Amino acid sequence: MSRIKLTFNWKLFNPNFHHLERELKNVYRRFIWCYGGSSSAKSYSVAQAIIIIGCLLEKSDTIVFRKVSATIDESIYKDFKTIIDNLGLNQFFKCQSKKIICSNGSVIVFKGLDDSEKIKGISSFKRVVLEEISEYDFADFKQIRKRLRGMEGQQIVCMFNPIDKEHWIKKEIFDKEVKNPLSKFLVDSNGVLRLNVDEKYTEVTEKWEGQPIHVKGKEYPSNIVVIKSTYLNNFWVVGSPCETFGLLDIQTIADFEHDKKTDYNFYSVYALGNWGKINRGGEFYKTFKAENQVKDNSYDPELPLHISFDENVNPYLTLSVYQAQGLKSWKIDEICLEHPLNTLGHTLNTFIKKYPPSKQTVFIYGDRTSLKADTKLQKGQNFFTIIEDRLKTEGYIFKRRLPTKNPSVVSRGNFINEIFASNIFGIEYTIDSKCTKTINDYESVKESSDGTKEKTKTRHPVTKVTYEEYGHLTDTDDYFLCEYYKEQYTTYLNPPKPDTYETKGSLADIGIDY
């Protein structure tokens, strides 16, 4: 039989495919997680990669699972058939009921996990693809991990939307894995672009791998890689960067923009691919609605900068950046450096790099208790003097703005809830959409029984340090809002008494019978 050479134009593929091509060929990668927003071509790109890399190039077998078998025909199986047709590969594939056979003998089998017994017998497959794995039980995933064995380079490819931050995928996989960020571009070990494709065509939203693994005293590369993408990485939604291929889907983009304005939590999950929350209730900031408070704020170099700190270093040392004009204020940035960069020095380095000194004044806010003397520092130094010494050295014009006494958590929470609910006193405060940790903080921090913030604690998977998971970014906002709007906050706490009128004479004098 004659050998046929197939050549595919790289313009047929999204960035996801180029990353998958690389990872499917990496024999050390056991787990490939593809997640993010909808319309990001996760499933479609996986199907393309399995057909081209798995079937045609490797001649390997793949089994594709969905939780419910009845949904297969109109979902992932349909994607595979469409791709075979669009790539002009019909002569090489035969599509049967829940099975695709390649002319070289490789197969793609589709099954539902309605019955856990179907997990048995997967060891003969090179790859297992788990479509919409967020619908699976953790027990399903553990069984698949254990039963896929006996062949070099076997892989489990998982796809999902991060619909619930309480999901086992986040708690058991993402939170426990020590992350090693990778370039979101396709580069080799020397930093040179891989493939004959311009850098801008191989960008995904985020990419990371786990730590190296050790077996019998030898170190091997990480067996897990995570690729995050959104509709903004899909050239058949937003068009290609050079505008010469792909599709600009105006209606899909408009629909995402509508969600952004009307239901930001939904937009955050299904457009931006961020971990979301299904069960809501008991929030400290009861009136916070991202669709109202979150905007696309821009930095104005002509206006002063306002910076607010939270001194806690775990899970990060927090610095929030704002600008304001009159009764209107807006958050433009959050600097939250995690271990091992969670120091004041590294945080200030980042701020200085992003906002170099100019003629504008920098106003400093934060927790008044950080003025306390620290035995670890030189006499006369504290958290704020260190900040001011560094800013002075760099040539900033600055001014400290701290309250004479920290506002109570309950009263400042009530004040800010009134701002969100009704723009009390004409105050307007918005948060830039890039400040995702701040938005998550507002949506996550709960109210305790005494009306204060309930700062639930968790344990860092690497440092093993116990820390308060939420509340740090909203604390910086509290310090800024209560001090910048000091006059309004004082009036809120001590409202003027209503006018009183003295009645002269008796009721008889004004002709009323009694």
Image: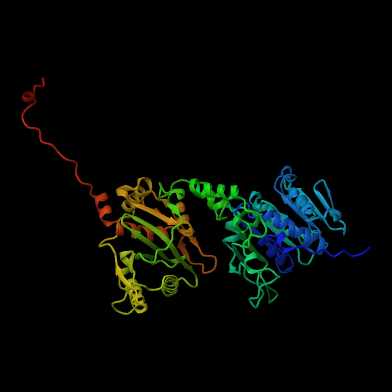
Q: Position of residue 186 (x, y in %)?
A: 65, 69
> How far from the left and from the top, in percent, is residue 447?
40, 50
Res. 68 in view: yes
Q: In this view, which residue lies farthest toward the top?
A: 513
Q: As displayed, is residue 368 above or below residue 69?
A: below
Where residue 499 sits, quadrant-wise, is: top left
State the quadrant of the N terminus.
bottom right
Q: Is residue 480 left or right of residue 217?
A: left
Is residue 314 visible in the rendered image? The answer is: no
Place of residue 361 in the rendered image (x, y in percent of width and height, measured from the top left):
32, 69
Q: Nearer the viewer, residue 321 or 285?
A: 321
Residue extending farthest front: 244
> In the rendered picture of this protein, how many numbered marks are placed on residues?
0
Tell me if residue 482 comes above or below residue 69 in the rendering: below
User: Residue placed at 87% from the left, 57% from the top?
Assistant: 103
> Where does the image place residue 191, in percent across and percent down from the top left?
63, 76
Quarter of the figure with the C terminus: top left
Q: Please, which colouring scheme is shown?
A: rainbow
